[in-house]
């Protein structure tokens, strides 16, 4: 493992030199954290909020990555990093000359995870009074892309080969489910792309409010891919229904089912600079373990018969930003 960590540090040294020269625009992000590490760091973050020194899961994961290498961060490594951060020393004091690696991982993880945890409120009915009220909460405020009550399956498939059009790696995670399954916005943001793409079929692209994350939802249902009224430029909240699972795509002609298996292609692109959009050096990260984490937070939805559409059951309000 030490040899692997050394090689990671060599790569990071070259990257950090490039970052400095390009005014901190990252051109590569190493995101190999696994579900147990993400879950442990999230739980520590949430539990520590009432403490004198609350901890950030991004700080914890960045320190653990320096100590172990990102692909080897275990739950134990997360607990060890949290214990270090509870001491009086800052990360810079703890790491000395290795602090530049911490700064890189922190910036990279902030880009991937920065909008997923924080303060939000859900409007629910008070059991005692029967009145609806806003219930503020701190925790995971992003949602699984599959609505609550709907089954799905997935497996690690990032980087697998795809051949339609040309040979290329798979830059997302395929979530298999039933035709028409409601798809929800993982994070609040603005609808930046809406319409047909021959590779993704009917698809939606949503840019996070901080502009760092671009969420891609593809292969939506034929004929009625989107929730009624959805338009490009519209702002949506995390957990809002945006569309329905299907199998469209792999055709230059619109509204064609050429995908064999009904599924959602869910992808996450990082954008540090607008020049990184729609180019040969896009930064897509593996979201398989992230989806596993988000599965614990799923948006409840209902069918609105009067308007013939699906909608979220509990109104949502982000208390940190918009």
Image (cartoon, rainbow, N blue to C red):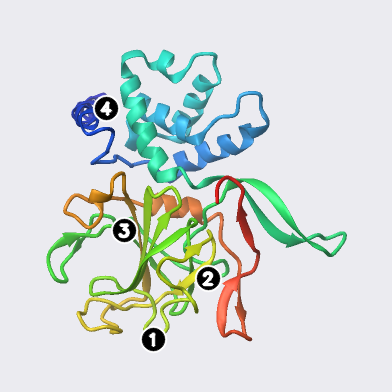
Q: Answer yes or no: do the residues labelled 3 and 2 have beta carbons within 8 Å?
A: no
| Residue bearing the label numbered 2 | 150
Which numbered circle lies on residue 223?
1
Quarter of image, res 201? bottom left
Q: Position of residue 67 (x, y in %)?
A: 37, 24
User: Looking at the image, which is closer to me, 290 or 280?
Assistant: 280
The first of marks 3 and 1 along the sequence is 3
Answer whether labels 2 and 4 touch (C-beta < 8 Å): no
User: Marks 1 and 2, Cα distance to the nearest angstrom?
Assistant: 21 Å
Above or below, 201 relative to 175: below
Q: Which residue is mark 3?
A: 172
Task: For mark 1, give the secondary structure.
Answer: loop
Tell me the crowding category of disc 4: few under 14, some 14 to 19, or many 20 or more residues within 10 angstroms, Cα based.
Answer: some
Quarter of the image holding residue 204?
bottom left
**Badge 3: how crowded within 10 Å, few (<14), some, or many (20+)?**
many
Q: Nearer the viewer, mark 4 or mark 3?
A: 3
Quarter of the figure with residue 200: bottom left
| Residue shown at the point (20%, 27%) measured from the top left | 17
Q: Which residue does the numbered mark 4 point to in the structure image?
A: 5
Image coordinates of residue 253 in percent, x first then y, are 22, 84
- Measured in 3D between alpha carbons, the distance from the residue under mark 2 to the one under mark 4, in whole angstroms, is 40 Å
């Amino acid at each position: 493992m030490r040899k692997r960590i050394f090689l990671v540090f060599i790569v990071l040294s070259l990257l950090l030199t490039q970052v400095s020269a390009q005014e901190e625009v990252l051109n590569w992000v190493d995101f190999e954290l696994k579900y147990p590490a993400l879950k442990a760091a999230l739980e520590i973050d949430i539990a520590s909020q009432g403490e004198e020194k609350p901890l950030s899961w991004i700080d914890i994961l960045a320190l653990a990555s320096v100590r172990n290498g990102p692909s080897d961060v275990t739950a134990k490594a997360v607990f060890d990093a949290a214990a270090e951060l509870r001491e009086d020393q800052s990360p810079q004091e703890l790491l000395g000359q290795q602090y530049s690696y911490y700064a890189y991982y922190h910036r990279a993880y902030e880009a991937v995870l920065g909008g997923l945890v924080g303060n939000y409120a859900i409007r629910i009915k008070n059991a005692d009074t029967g009145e609806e009220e806003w219930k503020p909460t701190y925790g995971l405020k992003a949602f699984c892309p599959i609505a609550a009550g709907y089954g799905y399956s997935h497996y690690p498939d990032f980087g697998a080969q795809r051949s339609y059009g040309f040979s290329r790696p798979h830059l997302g995670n395929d979530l298999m489910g039933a035709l028409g399954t409601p798809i929800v916005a993982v994070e609040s943001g603005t609808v930046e792309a809406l319409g047909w793409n021959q590779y993704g079929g009917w698809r939606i692209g949503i840019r996070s409010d901080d502009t760092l994350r671009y969420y891609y939802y593809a292969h939506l249902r034929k004929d009625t891919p989107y929730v009624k009224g959805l338009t490009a430029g519209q702002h949506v909240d995390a957990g809002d229904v945006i569309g329905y699972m299907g199998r469209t795509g792999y055709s230059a002609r619109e509204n064609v089912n050429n995908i064999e298996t009904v599924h959602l292609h869910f992808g996450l692109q990082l954008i540090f600079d607008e020049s990184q959009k729609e180019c040969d050096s896009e930064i897509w990260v593996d979201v398989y373990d992230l989806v596993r984490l988000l599965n614990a937070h799923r948006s409840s939805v209902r069918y609105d018969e009067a308007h013939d559409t699906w909608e979220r059951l509990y109104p949502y309000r982000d208390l940190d930003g918009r």
